[in-house]
Image (cartoon, rainbow, N blue to C red):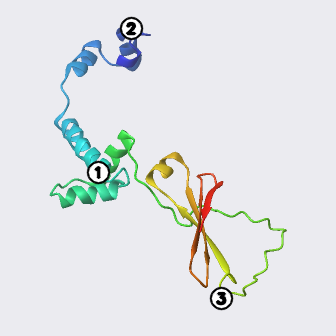
Amino acid sequence: MSANQAAFPIATMARVLGVSRAGYYAWAARPASAHAEADAALLERIRTVHSASREIYGAPRVHAELRAGGERHGRKRIARLMREAGMTGVSRRRGGPVTTRRDPKARPAPDLVDRDFSASGPNRLWVTDITLILSAKSHRQGHEACDASAAARHSCQPLDCSQGVHGGARACFL
């Protein structure tokens, strides 16, 4: 009712909702309950643990940290407080993101080394790898960082090709 009192009189809202005006004013003047105060204090401790984990921990880990510190609270209570405060943990789902979208009609590239990764001499065989690196910042912003690297199999001399967030190669060096 207090959120709408600029648009409607309290008496009208009380009549429509079926409550008395005196009851509303008594409720509004009442101090917070002991449970609400305990929730506010617990929420501050949850914020401390959550920020100490660089906002990675979700409710189960926050619950475990508080329990390790000697506090006993329900996991669902902690989950409710975190949800109401808009705090979430980082979730690494199974499968991961799809980094290659191959055309189903195209013929795959031939396997020129026939899965034999031993080289007979220098500069005879080069292999590459693309690694997807997820960070807390990239997770919150919806970006991934890719690191593409290549190596000469005989000399094990790396050729590092760092890529930008959107896959554009920036630098390659030996």
- Residue 119's mark? 3
Question: Which is nearer the eye, 126 or 139?
Answer: 126
Q: Residue at x 32, y 44 (%)?
A: 81
Question: Which is nearer the eye, 112 or 92?
Answer: 112
Residue 122, image quadrant? bottom right
Q: Give the residue at mark 1.
A: 52
- Residue 9's mark? 2
Disc 2 element:
loop
Q: Earlier in the sequence, mark 1 or mark 2?
A: 2
Q: Earlier in the sequence, mark 3 or mark 1?
A: 1
Tell me the amino acid under the disc marked 3.
Ala
Residue 4, image quadrant? top left
| Residue 136 placement, left or right of 25 | right
Q: Is residue 137 above or below residue 111?
A: above
Disc 3 element:
loop
| Number of on-image labels | 3
Q: Residue at x 27, y 47 (%)?
A: 46
| Residue 82 visible to the viewer | yes
Tell me the amino acid under the disc marked 1.
Ala
Q: Residues within 10 Å of mark 2 (few under 14, many from 20)?
A: few
Q: Residues within 10 Å of mark 1 (few under 14, many from 20)?
A: few
- Residue 147 image point, x, y percent: 57, 62
- Residue 100 image point, x, y percent: 68, 64
Q: Residue at x 19, y 33 (%)?
A: 33
Q: Earlier in the sequence, mark 2 or mark 3?
A: 2
